Amino acid sequence: MTVFVTLLISAAGVAVFILLQLPLPWLLGPLVGCLVAALLGVRMQGMPRTGQVMRTILGVAVGATITPALFAQLDVLARTLALVPLLVICVGAVGYPLFRRGFGFDHPTAFYAAMPGGLQDMLLFGEEAGGDVRALSLIHATRVLIVVIVLPFVFAFFYGVELNQPIGAPLSSVPPDQLLWMAAAGLAGWRIASRIGLFGASILGPLFLTAALALGGVIEHRPPAEAIQAAQFFIGFTVGVKYAGMTWRELRVDVTAGAVFTVLGLAVAAVFAAGILELGWLPFTETVLSFSPGGQAEMAIVALVAGADAAVVVAHHLLRIVVVIIGAPLVDRALGRRARC
């Protein structure tokens, strides 16, 4: 019953966004709807397994956009990708003192709150280090929420970026053999990635396998528009439902800390984006989405609906997550020893 209520709230959010002609109704509608319901104290429940399946659809969609043209950009991409580790360092350097001294979190919570990595990875690392998992969940959910709400509105109302690009052909127009190939690539890619322990297996496994099949000329279509809309819907409400059961103290401390950190992180990202745009390395939309501290799945969706090169955007976020996963535990140990001294 609680799941049914959550789905109704999410559907109402979509309807309101469509009625008001707001951007990204299938993603932002459920997200905002669940956030408002959480603030009103409504009990909600997510659907983690379904969310993973929807990420698989998104992985296939991004993988299908990888063409030989992407490899023609490798010389430029090498320069922008080389800036990603520096971005992670700068965001962490801004965030850690904010959480540790400004909001009084303990060391493990402050450290993993400041790392712009994947939400699930940061929760896992933070829990292992003895951090406050609930605080980390709210902080990172707030980071993703603000970025995914702010960027589409900035794109649409300040820069005139059209967020109504076709995300896929209607289901009825996609050849059945293409549907079968995409379904097989999604399921097999997810299974293989899970078996080898790849982080983000549900999105990255299908992405890599679909890309290989697309480059080989086997897959020639994206998943149908209806499937990508469903992915937006479930990914949107998955973020929003994390605020369920939130107390006023959590709103005052954890969510506020996450909001302040996100604004600072966006400011840092803007500096990097301004430099890249000045050098002319990447187009505007790709630059902003690649260096924004949002979630990988959410930024991929925005890239698809904005008509940007989703493969370029995902490549930067993939590297950001790799850098955080490999580097964060090493830096945490060093900082932890100093914190105890």
Image: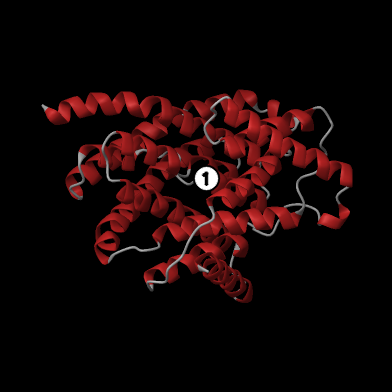
Instruction: Name which residue lies at 29% across and 40% down.
Output: 94
Residue 38: image location, x then y, percent: 41, 67
Instruction: Please determine whether, in this image, residue 268 is positioned above or below residue 321.
Output: below
**Which kind of residue does numbered mark 1 sit on?**
Val
Instruction: Name which residue lies at 24% across and 23% down.
Output: 334
Answer yes or no: is residue 29 visible. yes
* Way the structure is coloured: secondary structure
Task: Quadrant for residue 286, please give it.
Answer: top right
Residue 10: image location, x then y, percent: 55, 67
| Location of mark 1 (residue) | 288
Task: Quadrant for residue 313, please give it.
Answer: top right
Residue 278: image location, x then y, percent: 51, 38
Circle 1: element type: helix
| Quarter containing the C terminus | top left
Q: Which residue lies furthest to the front in this view?
A: 1
Answer yes or no: is residue 72 visible. no
Instruction: Please determine whether, in this image, residue 214 is positioned above or below residue 259.
Output: above
Instruction: Please determine whether, in this image, residue 285 is positioned above or below residue 243.
Output: above
Closer to the camera in the image, 334 or 155: 334
Number of numbered callouts drawn: 1
Apparent side of residue 206 relative to residue 126 in the rendered image (left or right): right
Apparent side of residue 223 relative to residue 26 in the rendered image (left or right): right
Residue 170: image location, x then y, percent: 81, 57
Apparent side of residue 188 relative to residue 76 in the rendered image (left or right): right
Q: Residue furthest left?
A: 341
Instruction: Name which residue lies at 67% across and 33% down.
Output: 189
Mark 1 crowdedness (10 Å alpha carbons): few <14, some 14-19, many ≥20: many
